[in-house]
Amino acid sequence: MSESKADLRDETPKPRRRQARGERRIQQLLDAAAHVFCRTGYTSASTNAIAREAGVSPGTLYQFFPNKEAIAVELGERLNRRMMETHGIVFTPENVGLPLGELLDTVLDPMIEFNCANPVFLALIQSSDAPGRLLEEHAELHDSIQDRISELIGVRNPGLSPSAAPAPPPWRSPCSRSDWR
């Protein structure tokens, strides 16, 4: 049985264009939310302010996100993923043998650049009422980075014992909700 022209038209990439347009709109809303969260803080931000910043109606915003919390969760997840990607790029076996100054630049510069390029990351994790698992996920990321740094130090200085390390400073885990009161 042969397919009709109507059947073939149904297989055109039209939905992909819509998906791409929808993804661009989502990114536009997330960028606007990032500006609003940085300017006012997460707690004081509103969906109306985010929509206004994005140049869209609140109704358009609600087509993509049910509330401010959902926007912050999506933004936080994307930022955590990007930070993990940065983390994966800088903590490589190839970097272990670099001279110390070059190693520090290689490891720290991308992380500093990430934080400078994404001030909303700090604005969200400093919020005492950050939604979802944002704070917990950031704490896991923070712990992972700290573990990788410890491994790096251990490889470069095999004589150091983790048990001989000093206790972490009191600000070691600033990401748990109880620490932000």
Image (tube, grey):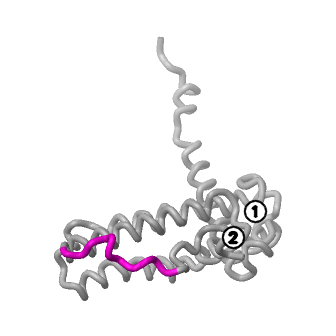
The relative height of residue 105 versus residue 49 in the rendered view (above or below) is below
Where residue 72 sits in the image (x, y, percent)? Answer: 67, 64
Where residue 174 sits in the image (x, y, percent)? Answer: 58, 74
Q: Nearer the viewer, mark 1 or mark 2?
A: 1
The relative height of residue 77 versus residue 181 in the rendered view (above or below) is above
- Marks 1 and 2, how far apart at CA: 9 Å
88 vs 30, left or right, is left
Q: Which residues are magenta?
A: 159-169
Query: Do the residues bearing badges 1 and 2 touch, measured as CB atoms within 8 Å?
Result: yes
Disc number for residue 98: none
Q: Identify the amino acid type marked 1.
A: Lys
The relative height of residue 96 versus residue 100 in the rendered view (above or below) is above
Disc number for residue 68: 1
Looking at the picture, tell me which residue is in the foreground, 40 or 169.
Answer: 169
Q: Name the residue: 58% across, 79% down.
A: 119
159 vs 140, left or right, is left
Q: Identify the amino acid type marked 2.
A: Ala
| Secondary structure category for the residue under label 2 | helix
Q: Name the residue: 75% across, 52% down.
A: 63
* Dominant SS in magenta: loop
Find residue 103 and report its image quarter: bottom left
152 vs 147, left or right, is left
Q: Name the residue: 62% across, 72% down.
A: 125
* Residue assigned mark 2: 33
Q: Return the disc, 1 or 2, that comes first in the chain's sequence.
A: 2
